[in-house]
Image (tube, helix red, strand yellow):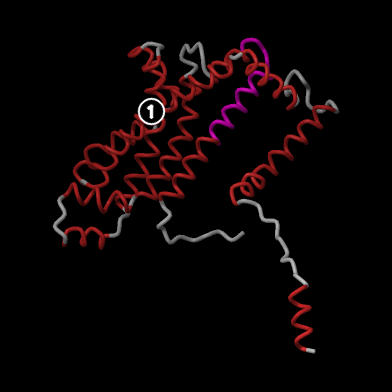
Amino acid sequence: MSTKGETLSRQIKVKPKREFALNGNVKIVLLGSIIPVILLVIWQYLSHIGVLEAHLMPAPTVILAKIVEFAGDGSLWGHIGITLYRIFFGFLIGVVAAVIFGSLVGYFRVAEQLLDPMIQAFRSIPSLAWVPLFILWMGIAEPSKITLIAVGVFFPVYLNIVSGIQGVDRKLIEVGRIYNFSTFELIRKVILPASLPSFLVGIRSGLGLGWMFVVAAELMGASQGIGYLLVVGQNSYSPETVIASIVLFAILGKITDSILKKTEEKTLHWQDSFTKKA
């Protein structure tokens, strides 16, 4: 009997159950899209029943049609391209300057006493206050716009680098000195890697401020850019153009921040940190 049972069990193949599992990135995108989709549906419904007036708050379908119109005539890609160009170079210059000054101020007490009070005073100046000065110095061409964005990026990156360096465990510094590291080696091999988490947070904050400053930059006599579309929408009393520009800023800002966040996760994969529960 046992032999017959074994034979039957071999003949009957039990198919394993296949569990449907979403890719991690897809799951994150889907979860992050829930609230925006709900808000869009509510917005569309309120516009449809007349609660939101079309000349003040057009429906999402009208906004989408406007973006498609810009894409259709080819002007959208030119505006996006020049805005990304300004953001990229302004961000790059701001980060490089922040790394240099932040490293000096964070490591050398004399540099902190000399430079930090002046930098903190500059940090208190509103972004729009720089606009007339940069126009006087550099005109309304690209250098003034890129410089303004670089100023916006500089301060959060600088603050996070200084905080990260000054928060490095003293024991790590002592280990570096035991191995006879020079000051430059100590900064490169011990201090900067230890302050990397704070530095990456500062970069993301700086990028966010860069997107805010690009609006002010593109008010400086620009003839192209998403910020320029905002001005066109305001002057032509076209709320759909204004809101379409805001939506484009939000989408591009989110995409660039996601790229930095993914870079941060890969760079800090060695970190034994708290993992959020699902």
Quadrant (top left/top right/bottom left/bottom right) for the C terminus: bottom right
Q: Which residue is mark 1?
A: 150
Quadrant (top left/top right/bottom left/bottom right) for the N terminus: bottom right
Q: How many marks?
A: 1
Which amino acid type is marked by label 1? Ala
Does dot 1 land on a helix, a strand or a loop?
helix
- Which residue is depicted at the point 28% across and 33% down? 118
Give x and y (percent) for residue 91.
Answer: 40, 30
Give x and y (percent) for residue 233.
Answer: 63, 15
Is 91 on the left-hand or right-hand side of 56?
A: left
User: In the rendered image of this protein, does residue 49 appear above or below residue 69?
Assistant: below
Image quarter for residue 75? top right
User: What are the residue bounds of the magenta stretch?
Assistant: 235-254
| Magenta: main secondary structure | helix
- Which residue is depicted at the point 15% across and 51% down? 182
User: In the rendered image of this protein, does residue 74 appear above or below residue 256?
Assistant: above
